[in-house]
Amino acid sequence: MDDSKLPTPHNNFFHYALSHAHAARDLIQTHLPPNLVQLLDLHSLELQKDSFIDEDLRQSFSDLLYSVRFAGANDPSIEGQVYLLFEHKSQSDPMTCFQLLRYIVRILEQRLRNGLSLCPVFPLVVYHGQEYWSAPSSLEELIGGPKAAFEYGVRMSYPVLDIARVPDESLAGDPFLQSVLGLLKYSRRRDFEDKLEFLLQCMLKSGTIEIRPEHVEAVIVYISSASPLIPIEKLTMTIEKLFHTQVEPGSIADRFIKQGRQEGLQEGLKEGEIHLIQTLQEVLGLPISDPVMLEDRSLEQLQAITGELRQQFRDRK
């Protein structure tokens, strides 16, 4: 796990999970159109390590691209390769179609530079926002205008996997992927804490892989950074209970847990100071400060206000 990418936890968690071929393979089998899946030799699935995007697109894409051969690639009449482009979105981005088009053009340009022929690129947008996906799913829809205007122009469309609308049991067949998509699905919902243990238990079902410490660490880092509603102590206890493992001292997950505990302590101290300030103001007959305004102050600023009010109380006595 690379903590340099943590400012965008949803995207990084998705990228981490789908970088494992078994998870990508299950996503393909479960959610891509069956008539496409039957054409593919999924045993040849291979993650593309090279980036095809420049800095202008860096903020828009997870850069997660797989190559796979057609099932009939031994037949000389069938062109052998197709790219599968997985793109994660946590918001309905109206420019997604244009972003995908730019990315696909870069992929094909790279192939030509390498002396390779052009090949199909199939995109799939995986979306986990709370609202329905409302962005245009085709270039014609994005640009607008009469259909006749696009008869000889560029045509582009993409499917969307809106995981918020998919029943939990239908998210994936692979337990690891089911857990990952479930965590993305519920991470910003009020009932996430109630779902947490079930989603983590999915990883423990007999599946295609053995759960390794890096998977557990990825989950801890993701939940700690993406869902502050879950108390860090509850998360740690649940992890240790289910996986019978303790967080490795000094690991990224360990640092996140310690940071969460420290932030929790700070919040508790701030809450106490705010209550004390309002109590002293009431006793002194002063206007009661708006708690929302006080919450914006640092702990040191709150303690300074408390000190002034205490001094006023002592002076009055």
Image (cartoon, rainbow, N blue to C red):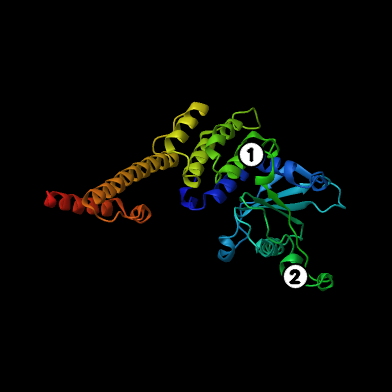
The answer to whether 268 appears left or right of 227 in the picture is: left
Q: CA distance from mark 1 to mark 2?
A: 37 Å
Residue extending farthest front:
285
The answer to whether 283 appears left or right of 195 in the picture is: left
Is disc 2 surrounded by few (<14), some (14 to 19) or many (20+) residues within 10 Å? Answer: few
In contact (CB < 8 Å): disc 1 and disc 2:
no
286 shown above or below 39: below
Q: Nearer the viewer, residue 258 or 286?
A: 286
Quarter of image, res 301: bottom left
Determine which residue is flagged by label 2: 144
Whether residue 43 is visible: no
Residue lying at 67% horizontally and 35% vertically, measured from the top left: 174
Quarter of image, res 119: bottom right
Q: Nearer the viewer, residue 307 or 16?
A: 307
Whether residue 277 is visible: yes
Q: What is the x, y in percent for residue 237?
A: 45, 30
Q: What is the x, y in percent for residue 266?
A: 33, 45
In what element is the residue under mark 1?
Answer: helix
The answer to whether 232 appears left or right of 52 in the picture is: left
Q: Amino acid at mark 2?
A: Gly
Quarter of image, res 172: top right
Q: Amino acid at mark 1?
A: Leu
Q: Which mark is residue 277?
A: none
Determine which residue is flagged by label 1: 177
Q: What is the x, y in percent for residue 14?
A: 59, 47
Instruction: Please tell me which of labels 1 and 2 falls first in the chain.
Output: 2
Residue lying at 38% horizontally and 43% vertically, measured from the top left: 259
Is disc 1 surrounded by few (<14), some (14 to 19) or many (20+) residues within 10 Å? Answer: many
Q: What is the x, y in percent for residue 102?
A: 67, 65
In what element is the residue under mark 2?
Answer: loop
Residue lying at 72% horizontally and 59% vertically, measured from the top left: 137
**Nearer the viewer's eye, disc 1 or disc 2?**
2
